[in-house]
Amino acid sequence: MKTLFLSLVISTLLSLSLSKELCNSHDKKVLLQIKKHFGDPYLLASWKSDTDCCKAWYQVECDSTSNRIISLTIFAGNLSGQIPAAVGDLPYLQTLVFRKLTDVTGPIQPAIAKLVRLNFLRLDRLNLTGTVPGFLSKLKKLTFLDLSFNGLSGSIPSSLALLPNLAALHLDRNRLTGSIPESFGTFKGSVPGLYLSHNQLTGEIPASLGNMDFIVIDLSRNKLVGDASMLFGLNKTTGSVYLSRNILEFNLSNVAFPSGLENLDISHNKIFGSIPPQMTQIPLQSLNMSYNRLCGQIPVGGKLQSFDYSTYFHNRCLCGVPLENCK
């Protein structure tokens, strides 16, 4: 009899522990507000008031200890409207992603500034407008910031250089204007991969960027002028540099390239001089120097002859394999 009673108690406790909802009631209420804001879309169909958000809901993740919502990732579906202010009421959020949702519009939600634990913010391939807000620089734990493929305009806030842990900054494919901030040569802590391509940025590349060792830097398809040689250097670990389709004008002859450079595109500029012989020692995987004002013989060796003529054509007087022989 005693054994039967004990087994009944254990069984009851076990069923109670299994049925106990893990989801924090505040977080659940906020998520249901977000769902309602978007008009109860099919994409969020798993978000039901009578189920546990830590066990049965897609697009969210709970912390294994506290059971607070730490990740909200809404990706590729039929969703329309602005990002709601309620996202700022998930105080333990570390990851916030809205992407590939072209009917999500409006400005970058100011309430995101409250998410001080955020380390991953991705709002890309939406239809966001307005400016890149300066408040993003207050999110000191950010390691990844992606606002690409939107309709953002205005200038780039110089305060983004105050983010001490940033590993990647994607502002590419927007309508940003003005110059590259001088402060981008003073990133403290980690130096982010810098993606600013396909905008309408003007002026010269700040000389201060020469102080940085960017693993990747993409400034292509803007309206930048002048010198870009400061981005290179023998002692840098830069692996990829993309500068195509600007109005850059500098002498390539004396540029010292990083020894590990793998991808280089300087096409469609006004770059002059000759190709430095040091380029034969670089492990290039992709190269485009076409549509410039380069002259002289293409140095023989390394990877330089493995690329076809389109890598070098439409220059002033480049010659040698894979182009015509030098006269």
Image: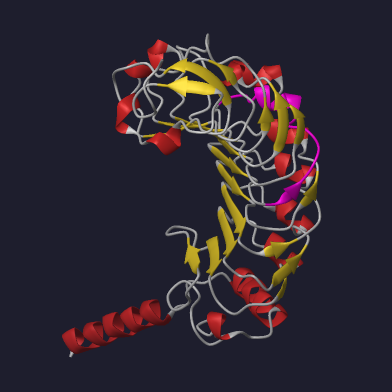
Is residue 186 visible in the rendered structure shown here?
A: no
Q: Does 305 sit left or right of 144 as displayed?
A: left
Is 22 located above or below residue 158 in the figure?
Answer: below
175 is within the stretch colored magenta: yes
Magenta segment, which residues?
174-189
103 is within the stretch colored magenta: no
Q: Identify the residue at image location x=44%, y=34%.
A: 311
Indicate the position of residue 288 as horizontal and vertical percent values.
47, 34
Is 178 located above or below residue 55 in the figure?
Answer: above
Residue 129: quarter of image = bottom right
Closer to the camera in the image, 224 or 294: 294
Indicate the position of residue 244 as horizontal and vertical percent values.
58, 36
Q: Does 54 sit left or right of 179 as displayed?
A: left
Q: Identify the residue at image location x=29%, y=18%.
A: 301
Indicate the position of residue 54 as horizontal and vertical percent values.
47, 71
Is 223 located above or below residue 133 in the figure?
Answer: above
Is residue 226 visible in the rendered structure shown here?
A: yes
Residue 219: quarter of image = top right
Closer to the camera in the image, 102 or 118: 102
